[in-house]
Image (tube, rainbow, N blue to C red):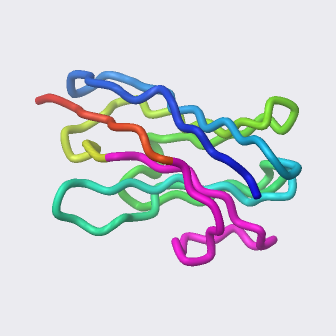
Amino acid sequence: QVQLVESGGGLVQAGGSLRLSCAASGRTFSTYVMGWFRQAPGKEREFVAAISRIGDITYYADSVRGRFTVSRDNAKNTVYLQMPSLKPEDTAVYYCAASLGIIVTTTPTRYNYWGQGTQVTVSS
């Protein structure tokens, strides 16, 4: 079992930046593929970014590719999501998730553990 705790959300103006962190405890962090997802009000949860166990492979949703950066520090059991140039449409609850699989995946059902989420609100 692994516990995931997100932090770093908040209210920012359009064009501003946030860095989300997700701290993991429990099983060895480096054995998990890690992902970030988000859910806006009235919408389904959607994939944002994912990173391989050693950080050499990353995937991004089309909506954030070139803006957001996912990274991880296995020594600190933490995964990050750097979000510059934020837009109002980025407003959502952001969740980190851990997958026991070895493949970097965008599919929510392939993730075994989830954090409680952190709210990101971008005002126009």
Residue 75, position as x, y percentages in the image: 87, 32
Is 57 on the left or on the right of 39, as rendered? right
Whether 35 is among the magenta residues is no
Q: Position of residue 34 (x, y in %)?
A: 67, 55
Quadrant containing the N terminus in the rendered view: bottom right
Considering every residue shown, the one lying at the far left of the view is 124
In front of the other: 71 or 111? 111
- Which stretch appears magenta? 93-115
- Looking at the picture, tell me which residue is in the foreground, 98 or 88: 98
Residue at coordinates 46% horizontally, 51% vertically from top-left?
A: 65
x then y, percent, for residue 21: 58, 32
Q: Along the horizontal axis of the image, is 47 left or right of 10?
A: right
| Residue 111: quarter of image | bottom right
Residue name at image x 47 percent, y 26 percent: 8
For residue 29, above or below residue 119: below
Q: Is residue 39 left or right of residue 117?
A: left
Residue at 41% x, 61% y: name it: 62
Q: Is residue 55 left or right of residue 96?
A: right
Front residue of 22/82: it is: 22
